[in-house]
Amino acid sequence: MAARAGAESTLERHLPGGAAGPGLTPGDRVHHSKPHLLLRFPHAEGMLSFQKEGVRAAWKPVLVLALSTRSRRSFGMEEQMTDRTCPVPSGGPASLRQVEEAVRREFDAGLFTGAVVLLGDRERILYHEAFGLAQVEPEPVAMRRDSLFDVASVTKVVATATACAICVDEGRLDPDAPMTEYLPAHRAQGAKKITLRHLASHTSGFRAAPQIGRRASGDAFFQALLEESPTSEPGARHEYACYNAILLGTIVERVTGMPFGEFCTRRIFRPLGMSESVFNLVPPSERVVGGPRGVPLGISHNFDSRMAGRAIGNAGLFTTAADLTRFARMMLGGGELGDTRILSERVIDDVTQPWTGPGFPEWGFLWCLNQRAEHRPSRLSPRAYGHGGFTGQSLWIDPEQGLFLLVLTNRIHPEYGTGCKPEQDRARARIADALLEVFA
């Protein structure tokens, strides 16, 4: 075999016929390098990596993730591995490689270190794979298909839009009623002119980030919520504002008499079997995707959701790809999953239609319909709707093609910086487009 490579180099060779080493067969590849480089060779049938014992132990989960299931030769790292369960597309493994290469390119660009990618329809999972690391520090932890993500603003559609739609179905809410009908204590100037439709389409006139949690917490947070004034006339401009979704979640509490998180659990998560979808706090474990430095593992990254003291409508949901699959299938099924109906077909059609006027980005009831959104894949149909999350998530549902897709990443781990966010949004769209090119 070749001499040991330098610390940062990779030496790769095919063993010629008859030249196999112990436990190896002709054609196997041998790498002398750092184990994390295995992530760049997802289709290698067998690989060797030589490292000091401590480093090898730290990367052991990643080795298991990266090695093909066809390679079970043990060199001190015997593991039980399972086959990938997705159907192989007509192009065979070569076409799947372009998805993996799309993810690798974004890793190489330093945009994130881990991702879970899923494409499905109402009955099948067409593709579901985990890549890279869920946690980079304090120790590297491999991303898993069942990793738990803080999905940030995806909360707005999975929880808030759905909870409001249930209330519309039941006659508790009228989208065209002024918000003060449900929040009479909101006496800020101009509040009486703002309808739920304005809030849900981000045309309310409220500013993007009032950051109420910086000046109040607990009950005082909700009191301060009712004192914020709009900065423009409702309907005059479009400005994406978390404040709108927080108000909508509070309105759900007022009309149902139930805390927002409890209502979502009882009426959305539990009926759909979304057993791992919870707000604001999950027990720290290797399944939890890392957040920014300074925020303990398993706690929401969002300051307002932490300071409010209970679930609110803009962010804070932790969930998995499997739970989001159940939700997306319900939406594709016209509000029904199996024998469980969450929403009427009528209300789904309504909340996923444009609620904004000409000249504005297209938004429904908190659902993004904007075909120019940075994280929107170009291969979706015009009827597709979705949402992104600050932490690096994309959920898109395409009723015309009968598909849904998830690209879930750890964008803010370990750094909280937002400077690369537009490029990271586009990176998720590129990954999704590579997937749609193979399967759609």
Image: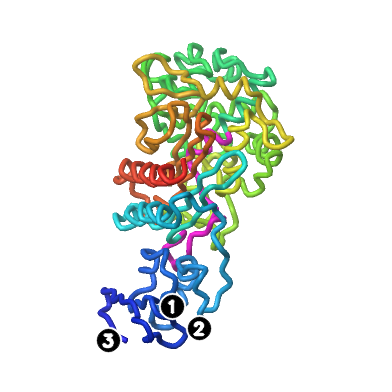
Label 1 neighbourhood size at 10 Å, few (<14), some (14-19), many (20+)?
some
Q: Residue at x 57, y 43 (%)?
A: 324
Q: Nearer the viewer, residue 24 or 375?
A: 24
Q: Which residue is drawn at 36% across and 55% down?
A: 101
Task: Give the secondary structure at mark 3.
Answer: loop
In the rendered image, the vertical position of residue 248 relative to residue 277, given as above or below: above
Q: Residue at x 65, y 27 (%)?
A: 343
Task: Give the secondary structure at mark 1.
Answer: helix
Mark nearer the viewer, 3 or 1 = 3
First along the sequence among labels 3 and 1: 3
Q: What residue type is labelled 3?
A: Ala
In the rendered image, the vertical position of residue 27 relative to residue 159, given as above or below: below
Mark nearer the viewer, 2 or 3 = 3
Q: Which residue position holds label 2?
A: 76
Q: Which of 88 and 349 is in front in this view?
A: 88
Its colouring scheme is: rainbow
Labelled pair 2, 1 in contact (Cβ < 8 Å): yes
Q: What stretch is highlighted in magenta?
A: 134-159
Q: Which amino acid does label 1 sit on?
A: Arg
Asked if residue 157 is among those painted magenta in the image, a careful observer would answer yes
Q: Which residue position holds label 3?
A: 3
